Image (cartoon, rainbow, N blue to C red):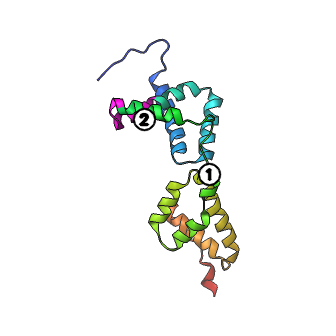
């Protein structure tokens, strides 16, 4: 067991772990292009005035990733290249509404083309637009369902994702 001495101006170990968790949340939102989650996590950090410690942790995480992925001289070249290409405004996650084609996504799902679905999701810079389009498509389809069908779909989703639920009578049982 290694015992370290805490310096006067050092964050307590518990605060470091909490900051790491906040940094990880921010990184996951950025990595998956979830602008809303990213903005929410960033807003919380600014409210808590923890931006410096989280920025430090993000830099540490990035440095560790570069150190593990590249030889030292290659890692430096990669970082210099990133620095040269950095946009002038790095406040938010890049978004591209044009690449979020929910119609193509629905066609791929209907065709059972898992590879195309994965490719589309991976290629969409901000998945919130893709999911928003999908939600809009579902909302447009709901009025076309026979009465009670939507409740059955919801009940099936709850069974699959939430475990057992109280029995919901099938809408078509009386037909």
169 left or right of 161 in image: right
User: Which quadrant is the N terminus positioned in?
Assistant: top left
- The C terminus - image quarter: bottom right
Q: Which residues are magenta?
A: 60-73
In this rendering, the label closer to the viewer, 1 or 2 = 2
Q: Residue at x 64, y 54 (%)?
A: 97
Counting labels gives 2
In the picture, measured across the screen, residue 112 lies left or right of residue 172, that is left
Q: Which mark is residue 29?
A: none
| Disc on res. 96 | 1
Residue 143, image x, y percentages? 70, 74
* Residue 78 tag number: 2
Query: In the image, residue 142 lies at what x, y percent?
Result: 67, 72
Residue appearing at x 67%, y 64% in the figure: 136
Residue found at x 47% / y 72%: 112
Q: Secondary structure at mark 1?
A: loop
Q: Tell me residue 45's x, y (percent).
A: 60, 32
| Residue 24 appears in the picture as rendered | yes
Q: Where is 148 relative to 62, above or below?
A: below
Q: CA distance from mark 1 to mark 2?
A: 25 Å
The relative height of residue 46 versus residue 171 in the rendered view (above or below) is above
Q: Please identify the quarter of the rendering in which residue 150 is found.
A: bottom right
Residue drawn at (59%, 51%), measured in percent from left and top?
126
* Most common SS among magenta residues: helix
């Amino acid at each position: 067991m290694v015992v370290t001495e805490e310096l006067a101006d050092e964050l307590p170990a518990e605060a470091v772990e909490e900051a790491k968790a906040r940094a990880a949340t921010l990184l996951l939102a950025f990595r998956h292009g979830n602008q809303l989650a990213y903005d929410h996590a960033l807003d919380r950090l600014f409210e808590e005035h923890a931006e410096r410690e989280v920025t430090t942790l993000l830099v540490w995480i990035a440095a560790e990733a570069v150190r593990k992925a590249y030889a030292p001289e290659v890692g430096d070249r990669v970082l210099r290249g990133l620095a040269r290409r950095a946009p002038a405004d790095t406040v938010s996650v890049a978004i591209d509404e044009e690449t979020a084609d929910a119609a193509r996504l629905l066609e791929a799902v209907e065709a059972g083309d898992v590879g195309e679905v994965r490719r589309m999701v991976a290629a969409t810079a901000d998945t919130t637009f893709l999911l928003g389009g999908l939600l809009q498509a579902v909302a447009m389809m709901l009025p076309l369902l026979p009465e009670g069908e939507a409740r059955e779909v919801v009940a099936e989703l709850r069974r699959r994702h939430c475990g057992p639920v109280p029995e919901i009578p099938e809408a078509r049982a009386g037909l």
